[in-house]
Amino acid sequence: MASSGGLPPFASSRGLAGTGHQRLRADARALSLVHCGSQTRCTSDQARETAASQINDGVDFIVVSVNNGVYGVVQAAKAAPGRTVVTTTYYTDKSKTAPGIFTTSLLSDFSKVYLEVIDAIGKGQKGGYVEMRPGNGFDLSPIANVPGPASQKARQTFSDVVANRVDIPEVTDRIS
């Protein structure tokens, strides 16, 4: 996982990725976290070097949470010696950057949550909290570059999270 910092949203995302990783693949290698600067300041070169190091150590799936650095991760994945390396990201869909490498993206749509907040303010509410979560501000882009059963499992798991059928602990103090 190429990440950008220790802010609570990043820590929570890393914790969730670790929990999902452990639930789905007991035989999989441990999830590793690598920092290469802040989300917006990790350069493409830094991300490429970081990803290449992980790939050389056997990593074949990279969760990217850097913005401009995604291009470096793609370069490293394309250059992987004799094997396929795939990646995912969140906030925006970067699949057109490298159609054969991206699996899916967790897409952010702030407009729905923003409108809920504005509506509440308009009705006189002076405080509160509107959670962005799967089904309320987050959705998955189409899933690609994985076997059909894995795609179906990911889509079903996302639907279960949206419907609150899956208990996902919020982990913000460590990488699970």
Image (spheres, rainbow, N blue to C red):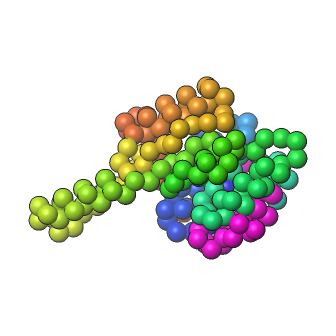
Quadrant assignment for the N terminus: bottom right
| Number of numbered callouts drawn | 0
Q: Position of residue 81 (x, y in %)?
A: 88, 47
Q: Position of residue 46 (x, y in %)?
A: 74, 69
Question: In percent of the image, x 82 and y 59: which residue is there?
Answer: 53
Magenta-highlighted residues: 30-52
Q: Residue furthest top?
A: 149
Magenta span contains residue 175: no
Vertical position of residue 102 compared to residue 70: above or below = above
The residue nearer to you, when weighing 164 against 121, is 121
Visible residue check, residue 16: no
Question: In percent of the image, x 62 and y 30: which residue is there?
Answer: 150
Q: Is residue 10 left or right of residue 55?
A: left
Q: Position of residue 161 (x, y in %)?
A: 43, 39
Q: Quadrant of residue 20?
A: top right
Visible residue check, residue 163: yes
Q: Residue furthest right?
A: 81
Magenta span contains residue 33: yes
Q: Position of residue 89 (x, y in %)?
A: 59, 52
Question: In percent of the image, x 63 and y 56: which residue is there?
Answer: 64
The residue nearer to you, when weighing 108 against 9, is 108
Q: Residue furthest front?
A: 96
